[in-house]
Structures are given as structure tokens and as C-alpha cells.
Image (cartoon, rainbow, N blue to C red):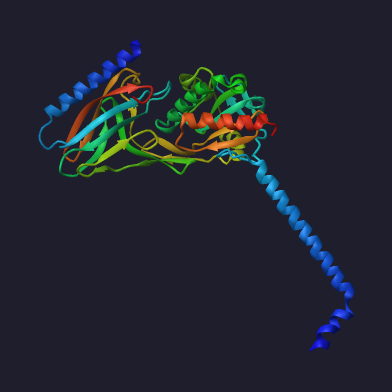
Amino acid sequence: MSARLLSTRWRARAWLTLAGGLLAMPAGACEGLEITGAWIREPPPGTGAVAAYMRLHNAGTRPLAIEAISSPAFAMGMLHETVSDGDRVQMKHVASLRLPAGKTLELAPGGLHAMLMRPTGAPPRAGDTLPVELHCADHSLLIQVPVSRNPP
Amino acid sequence: MGVRYNAPMTSSPPRSQSNAVLALLAFAALSAGLLFAVWKTEQRPDIPGLLWPDPPMIGSFSLTDADGKAYTEAQLRGHWTFLFFGFTHCPDVCPGTLAVLKQVTGRLQDHPAFRAQGQVLFVSVDPARDTPAMLGPYVRYFDPGFKAATASEDALSGLTRQLGVIYAKVPGSGEDYTMDHSASIFIVDPQLRVLSAIGLPHDAALIAARFRAIAAFVASGS
């Protein structure tokens, strides 16, 4: 019960931060990019790399390309795609995410995700909120992403 | 014409008889083969993904578990095991699948055979980074009852080769590397028969349902 309340509060806070971020965004910075449902999977003990998931939507009229996703809380960030043929899985590096006007792209478990490696501090725990930066062309968008054990 | 036609008929009755016997034998063999094929097919129940008939068997292997003890085929005998291969520096698929297996074991708590004999074993295919001691806290994060094991490359291949599990290091930047690996969940029965290999995407409801169907099939005397 209290865990649920807490997670709702965190989510609400993430939303507020996100809304604030969108309002404060200068014209031209990832214009039209909307992010919903962002979350980071809590890393199990002994591990530091995490996967960040989110839904990206281009509500603008021009195509967008997200060249990178990083976080000040991690030394390294990469766009990855888990590719599987049923049994064999591979992690493929993705150079950029192309998002035509009006389109939605899902970063979800078992598919596209942002892999964040080498945390600069203690590994994140469920309930934390981490800053994550999406880089599109010359601009970037900073969002706050909740860490949780399971998909929200 | 008539003579040329009749001549062989009258001159070789023994050969014609032996031909008939041969034809009869061939027909009998074919019928028996067909009947056997039908019987075999009828033995295979309508369970998707069931490796039957002639499921692969797990033979001897030797790994080290999270407590530093030997983990061999003896630890699988008498248990129903969900077996999964991965590595801890795997932020997407491995924790996702282990979280799904936690849901699966939760769903199967009302299954008497699983409650009595069920287990989950995670085998790391990255012994260079995953020591047995590290694997304990890793799997227990998902469920205190989950088991983990690994071994040196040679010993590891003693198990992975039996199951056709593949894995390969893929260099990244600097010291980082990732691994391509088999992500199937194997269902191993108490007699060490590998009865299913479930590929991605992993869905807890589907896996639990498949387990129930397979366990019922085995309990029916197969």
C-alpha cells in the first residue's frame, strides 16, 4: 500500500518534472517530442548497467532523429536493440532513432532500449528518479525517469 | 505377338511367384511402417512446444553453484526445473526473463508437483565476469529460492552443448563486451528429459500453462 503510494508519488513527480521540462524547452529543441511511460529497470545486486524504456512520440510536423540517450548519473549511454530469432538474442548498437512526424516509437523490454553503463555513484534503487538526456541534432531534452523493479 | 507374350508366362512360373511374395512382403512392411508412424503421431499430444517423442536427455555435467558447491545433473534429478542461460551484465533480456520466471513460479504455487519439486536454475555463460559468489545475490534478488551456477569455459560447454545453447562474446568499447546468447527457457523433468525450449518473448501466463500441460502429460504415464 505504502509502496504503491510512493511509486504513484514518484510518478507524479516525474510527470511534473517532465511537464516543467517541456514548458522550459527552447524553441527548436527536440521540437514536438513527447515522452511518456519512461522507466528504468532497477539493477539487481552486483550490476550497474541499466536499461531505460519509454514511449517516444513526434507530435510536431517535422521528422526527428534522436542521436543518443545519456544520463549524468552514468559514464556511458548507448542506444541498443535486442534482436532475437526466438532462441538466439543479440544486442545491436543503434546509431539513431528516426521519428517521422506523427509517429510513435516504443522503447520496451526485449526490443529498443537505452543502455546506461557505469553509474557515477551508487547503483540506482527502486524509488529513485534519474535524469536522462535525449539528444536530437543540436539540442537535448532532459527528463526525470523513475527507477522501478517492474514495468509501470 | 501372342506367342511372344505367352512364352515367358509359361516358362517362368517360379519367378512370378517369388515376385508376388516379395510384393506382399513389401506391402506388409509398408503397412507396418505406416501404422507405426500413425501410432507415434498419436503418442504426441497436442501441447505446443513439447519435445516429443524422443526428448533430449541431460547427461553428466559439472558446474559450481552460488555457494561454491558442485552443481551436477544430480541436482536436477527428481526436480522440475526451469533452466535459463544468461549473464549479469545483461540489462534487458536477462532480468526481464528472471522477473517473468518469478511470476511463473508464483502462478504455479497451486501445482502440487511444482510446489514439491519445482526449481529455477540460472546458468551464467560469462564466467570471466560472473563468479559463483556474485551469482547468489543476483538471482536471490528475483526470488530467494532461485539457484545459480556457472563454470569454466570447458565445464560449461559440457552442459551447453547438450542443449544446443550458443553464446559468444561481442566486443564493445574498451573493456566492455556483451554477449549473444540463447534465451530459451528449458523445461527439464525429474528424469532429466528436456521437454520444452521456450523462446522470446517470454510470457508468464503462457509458460505456466505450458508447464501444467507438460506435467499432466508426464503424470499420465509417459
Where on the picture, by quarter, is residue A72?
Answer: top left
Is A75 left or right of B211, judged from the image as shown? Answer: left
Closest to the observer: A59 or A40?
A: A59
In the rendered view, tell whether residue A129 sits above or below residue B21.
above
Residue furthest top in the image = A2
Q: In this view, does A114 lie to the left or right of A140?
A: right
Q: Position of residue A6 (x, y in %)?
A: 30, 14
**Residue for point 81% across, 62% down:** B24
Q: In the rendered view, does B62 fall on the left or right side of B131? A: right
Asked if residue B123 can be seen in this view, the reply is: no
Could you say which is closer to the camera, residue A110 or residue A138? A110
Q: Residue at x 19, y 22 (%)?
A: A17
Q: Position of residue A143 (x, y in %)?
A: 22, 27
Most foreground residue, A132 or A38: A38
Q: Is residue B126 above or below residue A103?
A: above
Whether residue B180 is situated above or below residue B128 in the rendered picture? below
The count of marks equals: 0
Q: Which residue lies furthest to the front in this view?
A: B2
What residue is drawn where x is 15% and y is 43%?
Answer: A61
Can residue B196 be seen at all in this image of the molecule? yes
x and y percentages locating residue B200 in the rendered image: 46, 37
Quadrant where the image shows the N terminus of chain B: bottom right
